[in-house]
Amino acid sequence: MTYVVTENCIRCKYMDCVEVCPVDCFYVGENFLVIHPDECIDCGVCEPECPAEAILPDSDDRAAEWAEVNREYSQQWPNITRKGEAPPDAEEWNGKPNKRPLLSPNPGKP
């Protein structure tokens, strides 16, 4: 099992989860984070740290469609090990539905 970053992270990208990860398995995109499924040790410390509640175990049905997104982009984007600044409008985007079309494929800055 692994943890998966899901849709609500898009344009929120708070990054609190990054600081607590003991194995540095987060990767950063322009407006989204992902977890590398082969590096995640399933410790679960990231899940309660996410203010957007965007991190779920892959056993949760809501995570299913995002598992492949996490796998794909974790192989393309740079690794991130320190919390960065959340977007200035993160609160406005938190909880908004249907953000999938806004997911940028561009890498972020670690």
Image: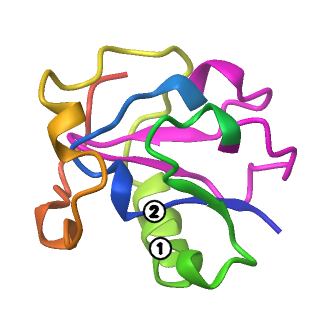
> At x 14% / y 21%, what residue is drawn?
88
| Magenta region includes residue 40 | yes
- In the depicted structure, whether residue 107 falls above or below residue 103: above
In the displayed structure, does residue 88 sit left or right of residue 54? left
Q: Which mark is residue 66?
A: 1
Of residue 36 and residue 49, the one placed in the foreground of this image is 49
**What count of labels does the image hold?**
2
Q: Quadrant of residue 12?
A: top left
Task: Determine whether label 1 and label 2 are within 8 Å by CB.
Answer: yes
Query: Which comes before the other along the chain, label 1 or label 2?
Result: 2
Q: Quadrant of the C terminus?
A: top left
Q: Quadrant of the N terminus?
A: bottom right
Residue type at mark 2 is Thr
In the displayed structure, does residue 7 sit left or right of residue 83? left
Please state the horizontal and vertical placement of residue 51, each as a whole percent of the image.
48, 35
> At x 21% / y 40%, what residue is drawn?
30
In the displayed structure, does residue 1 sit left or right of residue 71? right
Please state the horizontal and vertical placement of residue 81, each as a whole percent of the image.
56, 20
As helix, strand or loop, the secondary structure at mark 2 comes to: loop
What range is drawn magenta here?
Answer: 18-47
